[in-house]
Amino acid sequence: MLHFLRRALIIFSVLALFILPSAGALTAADNGQGKDPPDLERIVFVHPKVKDVKPSPAKPPKEPVLYSYSRYHWSNLPVTYYYNPSSSPVSNAQDGVIASFEAWEAAGSGVDFTFGGTTDVLPGLDVSVPDYKNVVGWAPLNDPGSVAITIIWSNTRTKLVVDTDTIFNLDSGYAWVQGTISVGADPDLAQLTNTSAYDVDVQNIMTHEAGHWLVLNDLYTDAASEQTMYGYASDSELKKRSLETGDIAGVNKIYP
Ligand SMILES: [Zn+2]
């Protein structure tokens, strides 16, 4: 019996010499040192130009819900973002983009964005992997009814965001501008000059999209129609430039 055990121990020791080093190498690859990508998921927020689909809950809540938090968030602040002016129909669109992020920073929260300047990198539209560069830019979108979309890449397990991009729709149906309103005027009471096109303000849309960067969800109830995170846009609107009570409560909840 003792002899058998000794032989078994010798055989196991010899086998271990071959097996254990390769087992160690496999573990290193699984930890991201090798070719396996981390577990990532892609979330897309679409901002439609018209209020054509209205989800109606069977039982509306007693208290209006004025923000909705996705549970996804950034771990490392500041979040550096870039602007790609390629194909932009608006010469001063960058001003609107910067002002949009500043609106959220000014909401008294712990959120912090840094403008990294302009870039040639395109915002990731039809890509299967994140490029880890947060870009705002322009492209024709497949759906002409979408004013803009924001794409968020995050880790499925930790819910930490790793990459975010926003694309403004270059579809010919949109007349993009960076509107000017008089100093001190309330954006909630102002509108763009209305033309026959669908008039759309860069800063108005980007302030909403920057809310998705945080990562706040869209709101679709009538009670939330004045919030910046209201999920529908309207022709010539400017009111999303300024944050409302729900938006401010939301950002302070995520980044106190
Ligand atoms: Zn949205």
Image: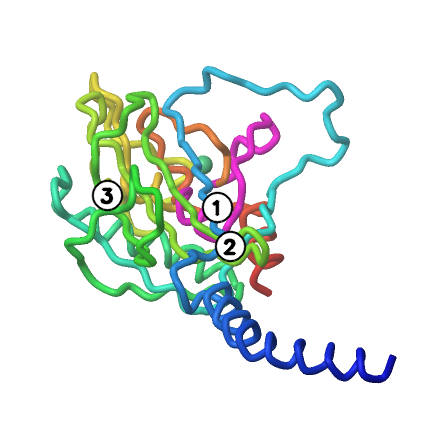
Label 2: which secondary element:
strand
Report which residue position mark 1 lands on. 41
Q: Name the residue under label 3.
A: 180
Quadrant of the displayed image that contains ligand 1: top left
Q: Which residue is drawn at 73% across and 80% down?
A: 7
Q: Residue at x 62, y 57 (%)?
A: 253
| Image spot of residue 254 (x, y percent) | 59, 58
Q: Residue 216: image x %, image y %?
A: 53, 46
Lower sequence index among marks 3 and 2: 2
Q: Which of marks 1 and 3 is nearer the N terminus?
A: 1
Decide whether residue 68 is among the magenta residues: no
Please give left or right for residue 128 compared with residue 39 in the image: left
Label 1 Cα crowd, 10 Å radius (few <14 / some 14-19 / many 20+)? some
Judge the density around disc 3: few (<14), some (14-19), many (≥20) Cα neighbours within 10 Å: few
Foreground disc of the pair 3, 2 = 2
Which residues are drawn in magenta? 208-228
Q: Is residue 252 left or right of residue 198?
A: right
The amino acid type, in three-letter code, at marker 1 is Glu
Q: With respect to residue 231, does 99 lie above or below?
A: below
